[in-house]
């Protein structure tokens, strides 16, 4: 029996900053952001957007009444939690009107959290093939105005429905995880912004990919030629390429990599959702994918947990994507001036919206939300 991704969608805030505007305001050559980091736009949340509203919008786009009646596991991967005790998954379970006899909880391990959730969801459905699991990755990446990390900020959510006989991707049983206790990135309780050792974080990411890839090859006997495309966690889009290039110059993989970062370049860092935004970007922007293709996914969470695994495209996958909706979502956003962005950033009400609203209020505030 195959288990995997039956539906997948993302949602991002209604506003963004253009990276040329940010570079000029900070006295930096725009090429440092556009080419050096590989980022063109940066999503910005306002006072009526947080990880609950982002996650609700991402999930509502793909869930039917039948899904809500069949889901009995809801897991949220996030490092932007609104509550030190109550899980965001419990709030979203209520907002999304999922049947009550379900488990709902939250997972934290930096940007790796959603992958841990996906692996747990897969095992749950394997044991209960008549049931479904909902995984939501929702985060707001903030480092502070004029900080070194400012151009790698972003926000958004990805929702994934995991089922038996999936209609998009079948997950293979070949994942290789890696855990190392490294303080490259962390945020002590009570602190607004994370502490980051950028040089160490970049090197740890690169080394982690090399380690899990070598172990993956030993366990499976597969190599880069066995993959049609690879997708990476993308705190900024050049990061994945920095990890891949020392190990492979496969022209096709590099070409597909560019398709897998189209959306990420326009959004910025989604933390837990970053890898899965890249996956959606690949599926919706590549013209070479066909059923049976093997895709590789590299997940990374500072701190450090990493994992490499693969999935195969199933017949008719392209009919189950949300391409038109996603492109409209990105194109319909409002471009902020730097002064508007800075005012929003400094607002004390930022990031406390979703727990106050019903789902209808959450969605009615989004003029380009398309329920169909």
Image: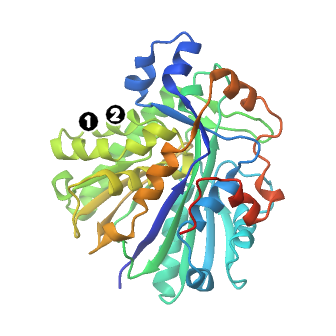
For the question of whether residue 250 can be seen, the reply is no
Report crowding for label 1: few under 14, some 14 to 19, many 20 or more residues within 10 A (C-alpha): few
Q: Residue 61: percent from the left, percent from the top?
A: 55, 66
Q: Residue 117: percent from the left, percent from the top?
A: 55, 65
Q: Residue 279: percent from the left, percent from the top?
A: 39, 55
| Label 2 sits on residue | 242
**Side of 249 relative to 84 (left or right):** left
SS assignment at label 2: helix
| Label 1 sits on residue | 245
Residue drawn at x 80%, y 58% is 355
Q: Are marks 2 and 1 in contact (CB under 8 Å)?
A: yes
Report crowding for label 2: few under 14, some 14 to 19, many 20 or more residues within 10 A (C-alpha): some
For the question of whether residue 256 can be seen, the reply is yes
Residue drawn at x 65%, y 49% is 79
Q: Nearer the viewer, residue 55 or 252?
A: 55
Determine whether 73 is above or below 271 in the image.
Answer: below
SS assignment at label 1: loop
Residue drawn at x 50%, y 12% is 28
């Amino acid at each position: 029996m195959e288990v995997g991704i039956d539906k997948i969608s993302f949602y991002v805030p209604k506003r963004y900053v253009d990276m040329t505007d940010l570079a000029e305001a900070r006295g930096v050559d725009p090429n440092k952001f556009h080419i050096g980091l590989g980022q063109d736009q940066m999503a910005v949340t306002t006072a009526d957007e947080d990880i609950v509203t982002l996650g609700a919008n991402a999930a509502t786009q793909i869930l039917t009444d039948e899904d809500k009646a069949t889901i009995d596991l809801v897991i949220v991967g996030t490092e932007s939690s609104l509550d030190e005790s109550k899980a965001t998954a419990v709030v979203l379970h209520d907002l999304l009107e999922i049947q009550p006899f379900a488990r709902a909880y939250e997972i934290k391990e930096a940007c790796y959290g959603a992958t841990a959730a996906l692996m747990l969801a897969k095992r749950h459905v394997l044991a209960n093939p008549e049931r479904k699991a909902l995984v939501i990755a929702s985060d707001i990446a903030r480092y502070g105005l004029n900080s070194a990390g400012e151009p790698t900020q972003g926000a958004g959510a990805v929702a994934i429905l995991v089922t038996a006989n999936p209609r998009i991707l079948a997950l293979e049983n070949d994942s290789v995880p890696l855990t190392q206790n490294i303080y490259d990135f962390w945020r002590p309780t009570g602190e607004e912004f994370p502490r980051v050792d950028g040089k160490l974080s970049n090197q740890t990411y690169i080394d982690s990919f090399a380690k899990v890839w070598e172990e993956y090859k030993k366990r499976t006997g597969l190599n880069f030629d066995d993959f049609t495309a690879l997708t990476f966690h993308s705190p900024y889009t050049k990061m994945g390429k920095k990890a891949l290039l020392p190990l492979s110059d496969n022209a096709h993989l590099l070409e597909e990599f560019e398709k897998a970062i189209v959306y990420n370049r326009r959004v910025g860092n989604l933390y837990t959702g970053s890898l899965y935004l890249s996956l959606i970007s690949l599926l919706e922007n590549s013209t070479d994918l066909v059923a049976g293709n093997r895709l590789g996914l590299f997940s990374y969470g500072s701190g450090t947990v990493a994992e490499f695994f693969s999935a195969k495209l199933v017949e008719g996958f392209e009919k189950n994507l949300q391409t038109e909706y996603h492109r409209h979502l990105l194109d319909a956003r409002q471009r902020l001036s730097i002064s508007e962005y800075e005012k929003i950033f400094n607002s004390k009400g930022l990031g406390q919206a979703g727990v106050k609203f019903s789902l209808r209020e959450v969605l009615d505030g989004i003029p380009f939300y398309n329920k169909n």
